[in-house]
């Protein structure tokens, strides 16, 4: 990870929580996402999720209703959870791939 990327992540309040061969996990508060890496570069962002009482849950939509899906169960997502997940995902994308830098 470059010093520039580390500084952008810190400024956004995002931390790298784990790193594997092909993925890194990034977190902020109770939101997290896996980002795929290849040849030392981040290549794609997986779904962002949020930690709940039942573990990691991903935001899904059913008939226009926001739901948190985890371990075979789904519960309705409240507007704060939807906003937190979307903001985290958007901030992470902009931090890893700034719009003013070529990919």
Image: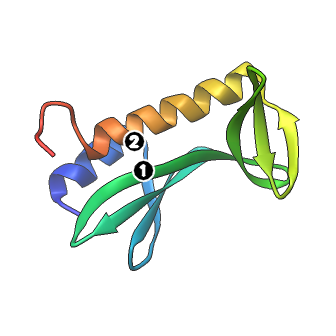
Closer-to-camera residue (18/99) = 99
Q: Which of marks 1 and 2 is nearer the N terminus?
A: 1
How many badges with numbers are in the image?
2
Closer-to-camera residue (62/56) = 62
Which quadrant of the structure image shows residue 101?
A: top left
Callout 1: few (<14), some (14-19), or many (20+) C-alpha neighbours within 10 Å? Answer: some
x and y, in percent, of residue 51 in the image: 71, 49
Q: Quadrant of the N terminus?
A: bottom left
Q: Circles 1 and 2: CB distance less than 8 Å?
A: yes
Q: Judge whether 71 appears above or below 50 on screen.
A: below
Q: Judge whether 9 appears above or below 2 on screen.
A: above
> Label 2: which residue?
92
Residue at x 16%, y 50% (from the top left corner): 4
> Label 1: which residue?
45
Which quadrant of the structure image shows residue 29?
A: top right
Mark 1 or mark 2, whichever is nearer to me: 1
């Amino acid at each position: 990870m470059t010093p520039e990327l580390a500084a952008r992540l810190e400024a956004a309040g995002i931390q790298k929580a784990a790193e594997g061969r092909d993925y890194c996990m990034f977190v902020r508060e109770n939101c997290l996402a896996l980002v795929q890496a290849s040849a030392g570069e981040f290549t794609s962002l997986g779904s962002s999720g949020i930690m709940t009482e039942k573990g990691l849950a991903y935001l899904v939509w059913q008939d226009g209703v926001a739901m948190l899906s985890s371990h075979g169960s789904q519960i309705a997502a409240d507007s704060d959870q939807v906003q937190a997940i979307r903001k985290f995902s958007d901030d992470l994308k902009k931090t890893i791939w700034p719009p003013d830098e070529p990919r």
